[in-house]
Image: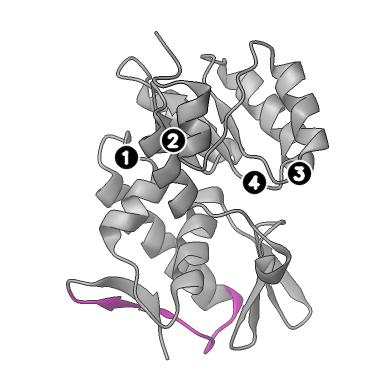
Amino acid sequence: MDILRGSFAEFRHAGVPITVHTEIVDALADLAHDYESSLILAGGESFERLAAIVQIAEPVCGGSIFLGVSDSTETATIEVAIRAGLRGTVRLPITPDRLREVARLHPRTGPQDRSLRFGELTLDVPHRSLRWRDHALLLPPREFELLHQIVRAYPESVSIDTLALAFGSDLEDPHASVRVAMTKLRARLANFAPAQALIETVRVAGYRLAS
């Protein structure tokens, strides 16, 4: 199956220049020299390789790491990828428009938003953790993604459609996955920092931080 649909010039014109490597070692070397790049794994890596690649790539990748998926990608593979720390999925073949939408949903983390504060809580973006006073809580990938999207959008709400797309539209039921993760995140926040900012459900609109 083709990984790309479109010329390199078309990707550059769309504002999302892309480089293709046949070996993961070459891709990781590129990341080490371009911290702001994101990584899309589209080579059908095994479960074990996914976890190892993410562990190596995260310290040198200032962007996000995604899994390239097709109709033949098994749900179990996507679930393993998300648990390993991948940010979401990208439908193959990658097109300029598709990659531009991914870039919009997952903007590069600049110095100004590597930590986000709300109330007495601080979201540590690079370490995917939440800090409250002298305590720190490492969040599971999906729960971190939910909280990150909602904190960035404050005071606006984030629709469940947007959150489902950020999770990866190739899950069997991404909307249900969002709801399950939201329930777990709310319980985790309540146990970690009682009486701090909670996430409220906005009818029709989605979710937002409580004022």
Mark toward the start of the polypeptide (3 vs 2): 3
Q: Nearer the viewer, mark 3 or mark 2?
A: 3
Instruction: Give the magenta range.
Output: 192-203
Q: Are marks 4 and 1 in contact (CB under 8 Å)?
A: no
Q: Given the image, on which type of amino acid does mark 4 rest?
A: Gly
Q: Assign a secondary structure to mark 3.
A: loop
Q: Assign a secondary structure to mark 2.
A: strand
Residue 109: x %, y % from top left: 64, 58
Q: If the image is split into quadrants, where does the C terminus sit?
A: bottom left
Mark toward the start of the polypeptide (3 vs 1): 3
Q: Are marks 4 and 2 in contact (CB under 8 Å)?
A: no
Label 3 sits on residue: 35
Between 150 and 138, the one lying in front of the other is 150
Label 4 sits on residue: 63
Question: Spatial distance from mark 3 to mark 4, Cα to Cα?
Answer: 7 Å
Label 1 sits on residue: 169
